[in-house]
Image (spheres, grey):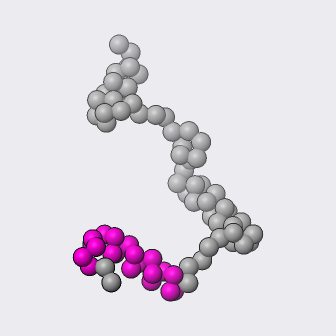
Amino acid sequence: MSLQDQNTARNEHDTGTARRSLRGFAAMDPKRQREIASLGGRAAHQSGHAHEFTSEEARAAGRKRHAARNGPSEQR
């Protein structure tokens, strides 16, 4: 068995699934990923497609999230 086969077998045993090599965006340096994502966010804002929450929308979303987490007995 080659070294690569041994590593693949070990990775499958450790995780229960075969591991895939990272390609494209996932293989990039995290700093470069943030730079690219930032460009997309800026473009969305400039084109008017980005959503910005108002304070009231944020409060409502928080209430929904906490109600869902705590169960129906604590909903207002």
Residue 47 on image: x %, y %: 75, 69
| Viewport quadrant of the N terminus | top left
Which region shows up in magenta?
55-74
Residue at far top of view: 1
Magenta residues, dominant SS class: helix
Q: Is residue 72 magenta?
A: yes
Q: Quadrant of residue 16?
A: top left
From this viewpoint, is residue 44 visible?
A: yes
Residue 10 on image: x %, y %: 31, 27
Q: Quadrant of residue 33?
A: bottom right
Residue at far left of view: 73
Q: Give above or below for 39 relative to 71.
A: above
Q: Quadrant of residue 72?
A: bottom left
User: Which of the two residues, 8 or 54, is positioned nearer the viewer here?
Assistant: 54
Residue 27 on image: x %, y %: 54, 43
Please name the residue shown 56% across and 84% down the image: 54
Q: Give above or below for 11 relative to 1.
A: below
Left or right of residue 69: residue 48: right
Q: Give above or below for 4 relative to 24.
A: above
Please name the residue shown 45% across and 81% down the image: 60
Please name the residue shown 59% across and 42% down the image: 24
